[in-house]
Image (spheres, grey):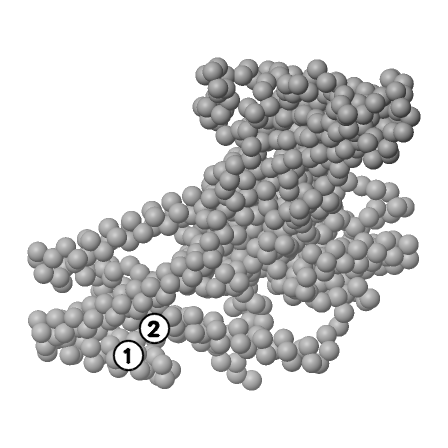
């Protein structure tokens, strides 16, 4: 059945209901992530029937924006479907397709522009379409940025290339409108992104947006950010973007994995309306459009060029090097801007990575006793009048301290005779050698910062009262972050102790459950054999599995989101073909909580031990934040940075104004110099030029250029002729822009 026949066939109610339900679900997720900010939902309709699109476009859904990856499919659907649909081309842009794409009257945006040559082709073709039909608007474009640096991805490299292309579009392509920037990030980063956790590709695109806005004299909010796929669009919206649209469901309720071609599902900032607008909304939108037009007029009159006009060096004094020095300063500024942008990106990348250092946490375990029979020397053990307040008891104390470095450890562990105690596990030493908590710096790491729970298990194999002691348990309050932040008192301590009644030696096991952020897991043997890791965070496991797929060349050539499963992968993915966006789901059954750290200790209550009590010492390796991370975080979140950017923007505006004044002075100098060299000829030529301009403006000029149109100067050609002057070019443009008169 052809597309035309399918359009004539009404869509089934079940199919329409499935489409509306999916669209409603996506809109609800977008609304939750956007938190009141308007976003434009683009439904990616590639490889789906035209009547599916028509069902979503018509009442009650009234969805307007649809995206296509394949140019030929877009050509066909644009011919068949209503012109009220706003099409987005989101596939790889080829030069041979630019002309036909730009002539689609209701093509709203090309979201994958990556070169100036393609921009000029789009601009030329769109200009022809606008000349043929004046109601066709300018063509919106997104500049694609290769933020991940992958060779398989299209796009412009971050930095000067992005700024140069955006500047050329704004200045040299009058039929295009720079809508913003777009990126297709690394698949593994996309899978690991959440609404709370950022994506490095998103951060790079935000930095590039700010850089382009600064260089072009625009506000950052005037440029859209098109980033985020079906798996990570909540995180993209949280960072200032959004473009998402899963493919419509297949008939019969069959689940089909979404395909990724070109940009795939995406989300971009902008208004979208799913119901007809009221008159008040229309008036408000019209008012906002007028304000935007007024701001655009103000910006168009605002000077942005900071380059010295040509020929200024020739006018300056012979021994003056002002022009050369200014150009050197401009070159230095460009290099400095590029370096600072790159450094900020590096800092953002470092902050995004979970960099940990491992240090030694020394734990001392000791116990004291009270009211033991050997302590009550004045009590006759042969009598039967024991008082209840003299019941034997013991108190166990667990202390921990993070060691700074090996040199300090050796200095602190020196005993009175100058010998150092060994650091081995279960080594006894004098109790006075145990270091006391010293006055430390604020927010230093404490024992409780490294563990989320602590339990003490008593030896059940031994009969008697001690064998039946209940376990001791401490749990950190929920939603308490790992580390040394602002913690409640019950989660911020160096010492933990408990008291029990008893008069016999007891064996106990202390279980310490590690608290790390992000959480680390023990990997199953099947997953550990693939990625060669025994413990890892969820993101580390996903990235390692992705690296294995690339290393073994298992990714499919045509559909990059699919990969083949070899013998090792089939142990964790029971199928022949896997789907990269589901790597997170594949590894979840193979992530197990880390086993606790077990510390054995014997509670001694006998007199012989307590004549010279000695603690039991354990050294435990714990992960701590890199101290450089806090400094980098302060730098990246410095509130003075925004104020500095505003100051730099104001200085740039002043510099552009000065350069504009220099250009005006240069024009006056050229004018007066020419008149001084040949006053008569200059005045004659100037008056003739002004007369021709006036005739052209009034529409009274003849085909040859007025009364002087047959003069020798108009007959002479070449690069130095009058035809190469700005007046001639302007006159020709004015003449060509006039609409022909229609006689009836």
Q: Tell me, for residue 731, which label it has, or none.
A: 2
Res 117 visible: no
Q: Position of residue 266 (x, y in %)?
A: 65, 51
Q: Is residue 252 left or right of residue 475?
A: right
Labels 2 & 1 near each other (Cβ < 8 A): yes
Locate residue 6 relative to residue 690 in the image: left or right: right
Query: From what the image shows, is residue 104 above or below residue 687?
Result: above
Q: Residue at x 26, y 75 (%)?
A: 709
Q: Position of residue 371 (x, y in %)?
A: 77, 28
Q: Earlier in the sequence, mark 2 or mark 1?
A: 1
Quarter the C terminus occupies: bottom right
Q: Is residue 582 left or right of residue 243?
A: right
Vertical placement of 313 versus 96: above or below? below
Find residue 496 and report its horizontal and vertical position in percent. Answer: 69, 35
Which one is in front, 725 or 723? 725
Vertical arrangement, residue 421 with respect to residue 92, above or below: above
Q: Which mark is residue 692?
A: 1
Q: Does dot 2 land on a helix, a strand or a loop?
A: helix
Q: Distance of mark 2 from mark 1, alpha carbons?
A: 9 Å
Residue pictured at 86% horizontal, 34% vertical: 388
Residue 540 at x, y percent in the picture:
63, 31
Is residue 650 visible in this depiction of the protein?
Answer: yes
Who is closer to the viewer here, 213 or 247? 213
């Amino acid at each position: 059945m052809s597309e035309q026949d399918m359009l004539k066939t009404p869509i089934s109610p079940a199919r329409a209901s499935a489409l509306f339900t999916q669209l409603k679900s996506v809109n609800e997720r977008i609304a939750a992530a956007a938190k009141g900010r308007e976003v434009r939902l683009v439904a990616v309709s590639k490889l789906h029937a035209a009547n599916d699109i028509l069902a979503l476009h018509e009442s009650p859904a009234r969805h307007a924006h649809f995206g296509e990856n394949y140019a030929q499919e877009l050509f066909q659907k644009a011919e068949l479907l209503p012109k009220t649909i706003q099409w987005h081309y989101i596939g790889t842009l080829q030069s041979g397709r630019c002309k036909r794409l730009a002539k689609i009257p209701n093509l709203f945006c090309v979201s994958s522009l990556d070169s100036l040559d393609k921009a000029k082709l789009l601009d030329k073709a769109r200009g022809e379409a606008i000349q043929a039909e004046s109601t066709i608007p300018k063509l919106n474009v997104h500049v694609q940025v290769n933020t991940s640096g992958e060779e398989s991805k299209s796009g412009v490299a971050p930095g000067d290339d992005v700024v140069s292309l955006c500047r050329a579009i704004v200045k040299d392509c009058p039929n295009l409108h720079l809508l913003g920037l777009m990126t297709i990030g690394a698949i593994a980063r996309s899978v690991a992104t959440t609404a709370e956790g950022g994506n490095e590709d998103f951060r790079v695109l935000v930095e590039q947006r700010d850089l382009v806005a600064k260089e072009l004299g625009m506000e950052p909010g005037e440029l859209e950010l098109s980033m985020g796929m079906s798996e990570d669009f909540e995180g993209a919206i949280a960072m200032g973007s959004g473009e998402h649209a899963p493919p419509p469901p297949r008939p019969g309720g069959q689940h089909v994995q979404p395909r990724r071609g070109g940009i795939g599902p995406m989300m971009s900032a902008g208004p979208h309306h799913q119901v007809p607008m009221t008159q008040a909304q229309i008036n408000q939108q019209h008012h906002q459009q007028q304000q935007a037009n007024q701001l655009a007029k103000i910006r168009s009159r605002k000077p942005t060029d900071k380059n010295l006009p040509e020929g200024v060096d020739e006018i300056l004094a012979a021994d003056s090097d002002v022009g050369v020095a200014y150009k050197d300063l401009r070159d230095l500024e460009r290099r400095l801007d590029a370096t600072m942008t790159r450094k900020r990106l590096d800092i953002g990348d470092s902050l995004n990575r979970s960099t940990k250092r491992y240090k030694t946490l020394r734990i001392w375990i000791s116990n004291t006793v009270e009211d033991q029979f050997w302590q009550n020397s004045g009590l006759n053990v042969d009598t039967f009048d024991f008082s209840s307040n003299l019941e034997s008891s013991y108190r166990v104390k667990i202390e921990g301290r993070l060691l700074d470095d090996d040199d300090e450890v050796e200095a602190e562990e020196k005993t009175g005779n100058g010998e150092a105690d060994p650091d081995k596990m279960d080594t006894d030493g004098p109790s006075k050698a145990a270091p006391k908590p010293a006055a430390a710096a604020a927010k230093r790491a404490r024992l409780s910062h490294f563990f989320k729970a602590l339990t003490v298990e008593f030896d059940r194999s031994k009969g008697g009262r001690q064998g039946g002691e209940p376990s001791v348990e401490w749990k950190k309050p929920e939603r308490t972050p790992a580390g040394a932040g602002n913690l409640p008192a019950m989660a911020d301590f160096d010492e933990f102790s408990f008291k029990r009644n008893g008069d016999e030696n007891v064996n106990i096991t202390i279980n310490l459950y590690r608290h790390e952020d992000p959480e680390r897991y023990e990997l199953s043997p099947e997953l550990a054999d693939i990625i060669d890791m025994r413990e890892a965070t969820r993101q580390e496991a996903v990235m390692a599995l992705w690296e294995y797929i690339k290393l073994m060349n298992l990714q499919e050539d045509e559909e990059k989101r699919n990969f083949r499963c070899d013998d090792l992968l089939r142990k964790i993915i029971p199928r022949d073909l896997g789907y990269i966006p589901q790597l997170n789901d594949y590894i979840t059954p193979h992530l197990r909580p880390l086993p606790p750290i077990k510390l054995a200790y014997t509670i001694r209550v006998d007199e012989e031990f307590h004549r010279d009590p000695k603690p039991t010492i354990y050294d435990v390796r714990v992960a701590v934040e890199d101290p450089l991370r806090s400094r980098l975080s302060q730098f990246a979140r410095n509130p003075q940075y925004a104020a500095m950017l505003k100051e730099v923007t104001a200085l740039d505006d002043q510099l552009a104004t000065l350069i504009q004044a220099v250009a005006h002075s240069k024009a006056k100098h050229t004018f007066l110099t020419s008149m001084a060299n040949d006053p008569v000829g200059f005045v004659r030529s100037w008056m003739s030029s002004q007369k021709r301009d006036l005739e052209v403006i009034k529409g009274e000029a003849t085909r040859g250029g007025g009364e002087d149109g047959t003069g020798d100067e108009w007959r002479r050609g070449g690069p130095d002729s009058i035809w190469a002057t700005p007046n001639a070019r302007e006159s020709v443009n004015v003449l060509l822009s006039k609409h022909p008169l229609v006689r009836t």
